Image (cartoon, helix red, strand yellow):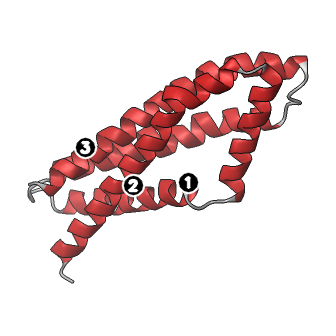
Amino acid sequence: MTIDELRFAVTVIAALGCGLMAGAFFAFSAFVMDALGRLPPAQGIAAMQSINLKVVKSPFPFLAVLFGTAAACVLLAVTSLSSRDRPGSVYILIGSLLYLVGTVVVTIVANVPLNEALARVDPASADGARLWARYLSRWTAWNHVRTVAALSGAALLTLALTR
């Protein structure tokens, strides 16, 4: 396999990973969080705690796709810097950085701390209900950022494949 063929394959994998993550995030932003928010707080909290636990305890497929795509994007970003004159390199760099910053970094610095705080509360407590009201709006807002970043990354990486 040549370097060009490898770069093409990694770009396809990264574009698909970005698209897959965008779809997962979109589903949460579009209807899952709204549905959980319609439940009584104790039930919504318990459901989200269960979802978060599943993600952490079963790293495949969610975490594998999230971080596998990140690894592909790191590789693509680095190689695009050394081949700036190649067609599509700017799209690859920007698409990769959008995913890495807007999806992975946002996950680590925004969504995960919110999930950790939610994991520590008793769903039936008054503290849990107060946290849940803030959690729903903050977590969903940051999830919108992840959705747009992943989808934009997918679009730019796909565009790079046409160059």
Tell me which amino acid carries mark 3. Ala
- The residue identified by callout 2 is 17
Could you tell me which quadrant the N terminus lies in? bottom left
Q: Is residue 142 visible?
A: no
User: Which of disc 3 and disc 2 is earlier in sequence?
Assistant: 2
What's the residue type where badge 1 is placed? Phe
Q: Amino acid at mark 2?
A: Gly
Which residue has dot 3 on it? 155
Observer-nearest residue: 131 or 98? 131
Q: Quadrant of residue 17?
A: bottom left
> Can residue 108 be seen here?
yes
Q: Nearer the viewer, residue 122 or 100?
A: 122
Q: Position of residue 33 (x, y in %)?
A: 60, 27
Q: Which mark is residue 62?
A: 1
Q: Are marks 1 and 2 in contact (CB under 8 Å)?
A: no
Q: Residue at x 58, y 31 (%)?
A: 32
